[in-house]
Amino acid sequence: MTTTQDELLPGTRRALLHRIAVAQSEGRTPSLVAAVVRDGRTVWHGARSSVDGHAPDENVQYRIGSITKTFTAVLVLRLRDEGVLDLGDQLEKHLPGTGAGEATIAELLAHTGGLAAESPAPWWERTPGTQRPELADVLGKQPLVHPVGRRFHYSNPGYTMLGALVEKLRGAAWEDVLRREVLEPLGLNRTSAQPQAPHAGGWAVHPWADVMLPEPTEDLGRMAPAGQLWSTTDDLARFAVFLNKGDSRVLSAETVREMRTPAAPAEAADVVDGATYGLGVQLQSRDGRLLVGHSGSLPGFLANLTMSVEDDVAAVVLANCTSGPLLGSVGADLVRIVADAEPRIPEPWRPLPEVDRSALQLTGQWYWGTHAFALRLAAAEGVSLEPLSGTGRRSRFRSNGDGTWTGLEGYYAGELLRAVRRADGTVDHLDLGSFVFTRQPYDEAASVPGGVDREGWRGIR
């Protein structure tokens, strides 16, 4: 990936630099490095350091903590796409005897499997992984702290189970499978389970004094699939492009879109914050944008990957301190700065290459009862149905090739849209999951369930 800064306006570049400079200074971190991706490539890189003349570049490794979970989720979804497993399978089917086998694979991916947030003591992030050599040592005597599937509860042991699942089904170590199936195809040559020079050292900064303490760097062992990886802003920028567009060598665009779809029930506080979780990725509404990505932390390191798919802008921020700058906010701000200052230029409008005559016949205004809707046929979206008021149920639809369409989102996701015709071939109404849409409000000439009053529309006398 070529790094170029010339594509951003000088004012945008200065605003980006100012944001990370404030984060490094006020967050009191030894170093902070960031990158911004737009239109599929890195367009800006910036760094700040407490050591003059030694600011890190895009090839310096930092530990990325729980961003590792997104990589593990990619491996699991590859197994699903190959037909080796189903996301509805219980863990017990493929990895028996864990004590947590009631949870499905999808629930583990979305942190709704009911498992504890952490492994039993001692603190796993600051102790050698050899202290937890078996899955039972990771789960403890009571793996479940909530009913399976009922609530979102972030779980590091849950992703340890997923890593073990990958090892069982691939017959190889998680690290080796990751390198072969994800890192090498995507060209992430500076992402690894163990640090490779040049890499940053991890530090704890005293909360009340400007002094530091080096943090231990532990091999997490069994817990590696939850947080082991080291990476760079350049590699994570490439990974962000993949999470946006997919790559046929790893996962399709459809599957990475599935990863970005909410999959977990949100807590009340999360609803207020506009936050939820997909399949290995975090989702949050901020500044009117849906942001997708993941954060990470381990003693000595903080990491964040944030992207706005709609704006086609992503940001990566890495720091080498245990606590300090709020990298989620920094990443969101970097995305906002670029998206607001230099909005995405849409592709030129182009007509459809060929016309679906049956769909064209159905375009225009329809009514569900008295609610007005418009059915459109667009090159970018295919068939779509949306309320004319601008609010309410809307969806795009995929053609089934037989004159019917299946809803892709919202209330109508998975529902069948079809035109119901009279004996002479003319359209009587649209049937959408049993809802009747007619050309006029309660059209007397159409088959409206319950019929239409014979006296028709009237006023008040």
Image: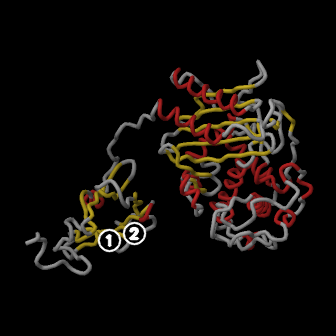
Q: Point out residue 138 in the picture as x, y percentages from the top left corner.
A: 84, 62
Q: Are marks 2 and 1 in contact (CB under 8 Å)?
A: yes
Q: Is residue 111 left or right of residue 449?
A: right
The picture quadrant where one finds residue 146 is bottom right
Crowding near the residue tagged with mark 1, few <14, some 14–19, many ≥20 C-alpha atoms within 10 Å: some
**Which residue, as the protein is rendered here, is positioned at the far top?**
53
Q: Secondary structure at mark 1?
A: strand
Q: Residue 81, image x and y in percent?
A: 62, 60
Residue 122, quarter of the rendered image: bottom right
Q: Residue at x 60, y 42 (%)?
A: 306
The answer to whether residue 85 is above or below residue 377 is below
Image quadrant where residue 156 sits: bottom right
User: Furthest residue to the front?
Assistant: 208
Q: Quadrant of the N terminus?
A: top right
For residue 282, the mark is none
Above or below residue 127? Residue 30 is: above
Q: Nearer the viewer, residue 350 or 89?
A: 89
Callout 2, which amino acid? Leu
User: What residue appears at the point 52 percent right and 45 percent down from the top-left corner?
Assistant: 286
Quadrant of the frame with the C terminus: bottom left
Q: Earlier in the sequence, mark 2 or mark 1?
A: 2
Is 213 positioned to the left or the right of 414 in the image? Answer: right
Q: How many marks?
A: 2
Left/right placement of residue 191 relative to residue 448 reads: right
Q: What secondary structure is found at the residue carrying circle 2? A: strand
Q: Nearer the viewer, residue 434 or 144?
A: 144
Give the numbered dot on residue 416.
2
Furthest toward the bottom, the residue is 450
Residue 431 bears which disc, if any?
1
Measured as percent of width and height from the top left, residue 218 is found at 87, 46
Type of amino acid at the residue the image marks with label 1: Asp
